[in-house]
Image: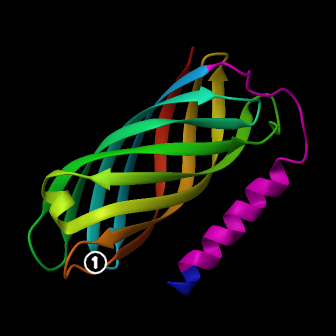
Amino acid sequence: MRFKIRTLVVVMAAVLLCGIVAADELEEGTKELQFDFSLVDSSAGSNVTFSGGLGWVLTTHHQAGPVVGYSRDDPDDGSTVDGVTLGGFYNYNFSIISDMLVPYVGGRVELYSGDLGDQYDAGVRVYGGLRLMTGARAALNVRLFHEQKAGSGRVEDLDSTGLTAGLSIFF
């Protein structure tokens, strides 16, 4: 666990340092439709998550919005559980480091429903990543995250670190 947190801190520091060189920025008032996929192998099993969100660029650096997803946990012990996730996210977008790369850090808070909601009450995720702008209105996203799910009842909390890939469409 200590190695995972240390790795996350190093990656986030690298992303912060990359934001020092400034060029153009995301425009205030722009909306972003984003789709993400992650596959995580944690200490307690594996997880697959698909999510989508609608973000508003509030200023050139700040972005927030709702997120909805589907998550499936396959624990090493016990039965597979899945469910819908509902929550919100916040991103801090740094000044871009080239005409194509936008580094960002952020967080997400989620509530769970379905069988997954019986296992875990809520989750918190922090992350750092890069957007590869493929044009004026689209980007490929990659981010490293650390997630903590709060166990419900006698279920233990779950910590995991992983990589998320996704697509953003700006309008």
- Give the percent coordinates (x, y) of residue 95: 82, 38
| The residue positioned farthest toward the left in the image shown | 79
Q: Amino acid at mark 1?
A: Ala
Tell me: 104 left or right of 171: right
Q: Is residue 28 above or below residue 161?
A: above
Residue 11 located left or right of residue 89 = right
Residue at (79%, 28%) from the top-left corner?
Answer: 25
The answer to which image quadrant residue 99 occupies is top right
- The residue lying at 49 percent from left, 51 percent from top is 108
Residue at 56 percent across and 39 percent down: it is 141
Q: Position of residue 2 (x, y in %)?
A: 56, 85
Instruction: Find the residue positioned furthest to the bottom.
Output: 2
Residue picked out by circle 1 = 44
Quadrant of the image occupied by residue 121: bottom left
Q: In the figure, 106 relative to 43: above or below?
A: above
Q: Identify whether 1 is placed above or below 62.
A: below
Depth order, front residue of 61/40? 61
Q: How is the image coloured?
A: rainbow
Region of the chain picked out in magenta, as a range: 4-30
Q: Based on the displayed image, in which of its 4 quarters is residue 50 positioned?
A: top left
Mark 1 is surrounded, within 10 Å at the Cα level, by few (under 14), some (14 to 19) or many (20 or more) other residues, namely some
> Residue 34, how many percent across, how many down?
47, 31
Q: Is residue 12 magenta?
A: yes
Indicate the position of residue 20 as horizontal and vertical percent values.
Answer: 89, 48
Q: How many marks?
A: 1
Q: Residue 25: within the magenta?
A: yes
Q: Secondary structure at mark 1?
A: loop
Pick whichever, 142 or 115, lies toward us. Answer: 115
